[in-house]
Amino acid sequence: MKTTKLQHIHAVAGELGLKPDELRPYGDDRAKINPAAVRQRRRNGASKMILVSAITPTSAGEGKTTTTIGLGDALRRRGESVAICLREPSLGPCFGLKGGGTGGGRAQLHPAVDINLHFTGDFHAISAAHNLLAAAVDNHVHRGNTLRLDPRRTFWRRVMDVNDRALRNVVTGLGGHGDGVPREAGFDITAASEVMAMLCLAEDADDLRRRIGRTLIGFTYDKEPVLAERFNVTGAMLALMRDVLWPNLVQTLEGTPALVHGGPFANIAHGCNSVIATKAALNLADYVVTEAGFGVDLGAEKFFDIKCMSAGLDPWAVVLVATVRALKMHGGARKKSLDKPNPDALRAGLENLDKHLEIILGFGEYPIVALNRFGSDSDEEIAIVRDHCAAVGVTFVECDHFAEGGAGALGLADAIIARAHDTPFTPSYAWADSVPDKIAAIAKNVYGARQVLYTVDARKDLKLVEKYGYAGLPICMAKTPNSLSDDPRRYGRPDDFDITVRRIHVAAGAGFLVTLCGDILRMPGLPSRPRAQDIDLVDGEIVGLVT
């Protein structure tokens, strides 16, 4: 693949005004940025943050990360000061079904293989810190349990960054008296770790310390809450994450600076890169291009209602990524036929696009539709989407950044530069609203649901939330990313459906309530043919990693 000459990481940092002594290099192609040094560069709100989101994901592919990178490269080609902010990929998708998360074609991050695998060790440090707390909890119970923590009401599980369904539900402490107290437990994937969410919403180390300390671990036999601060390992957890608090700096294939930091999933967490990295970028560049996981209904909703509300952020523009292939799939076309023109399926699938446009408008933001072009797309099909966007009054830009890099997204960059700033965004709900009202606001106004149903367990959880003072937290909906409903089989724009809340989990450290809807898993499993089977080490080079 032809690339521009990649820059030394000091040169990349220099574009953002960073000095070598404000970095901690990891070789010559990546570095960590000292956030304390960056906080001194206040730009007084002059920077413009662009959120890139997408229609409901399909197996046909939408290219949200690729578009984010392509847009950043295009803005730099226009002579603008720009920084891209993305999440770190999880090993789960890399070895599982999806593959890597560093873009594709000419719109990629460098070094892609390293970013997708161990990178700077952030995920490993977060896993270790999370599991240290888990070990401290079980050790306390084994050593006499003076806190009277009820093992049956202990929520803190362990994590690892590999998909492994066999570890979703386990029994720990087996073997005898010296091996701990037996209890039901389990593993989540690291991207679902509350420590990951805490890191990505924390302002700094002191804020992270407070978040860890207030984390709800479980309840006593008398049903009183037990917080993480009681186990006295907060300091050790912070020590493990000392370097994690520094955002990672890399570059695109065109040399555009990119801050890649934090990696919570959007279907089981809030799906945004760290506040520390986002605010650092806003202090260093005129334009900051970032993304939120999955579609507008999941990632963008949490970006607005959780990240922006907690961190005081407000986007300048919202880009909605769509593809002809995905729209046809939402219109009823089968995946194996997507390379063939199908205007009828495409028109039917535009209902999904319309719903996401409505959600963005509901936040008080004006969307720009970026059609990520595939080689099989016909001019007739592209014209259908273009004409539809004109009819509903939104800006449409055809993009070809996968094949052309930043040159293929210059029209999108021009549309961003030309737009005027609008009013601040409007959240879906007020944090002070009741929990049922907040959930209903998302389910009805964002997803388009008819009503919200609660299982018996969810109603019990709701009573605990209200009893112990957690009702003022925002909502982090955990549901399938494959549908606007909680049924992954319902493509397009479902109607006449209900949302069922199965459980409500208090993530007090992160600062939100995780509302589990549908059959959502916090530890994914591997597919019948995992991507890991294609990866190998040949003559010292890693091959087969899909990026």
Image (tube, rainbow, N blue to C red):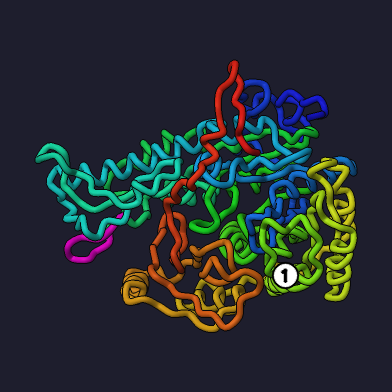
State the extent of the magenta-drawn residues as a range.
217-225
Instruction: Report x, y in % for residue 116.
Output: 59, 36
Instruction: Between residue 18 and residue 248, name the one nearer to us.
Output: 248
* 75 shown above or below 150: above
Residue in view at x 49 percent, y 76 percent? 499
* One can see residue 210 in this view: no
What crowding class fits label 1: few (fewer than 14 Cα within 10 Å), some (14-19), or many (20 or more)? many
Instruction: Between residue 446 and residue 324, name the one nearer to us.
Output: 324
Left or right: residue 515 compared with residue 71: left
Left or right: residue 23 compared with residue 512: right
Residue type, label 1: Gly
Instruction: Report which residue position mark 1 lands on.
Output: 349
Instruction: Report x, y in % for residue 354.
Output: 74, 73
* 525 shown above or below 477: above
* Quadrant of image for the C terminus: top right
* One can see residue 117 in this view: yes
Residue located farthest toward the top when viewing the structure as drawn: 539
| 222 part of magenta stretch | yes
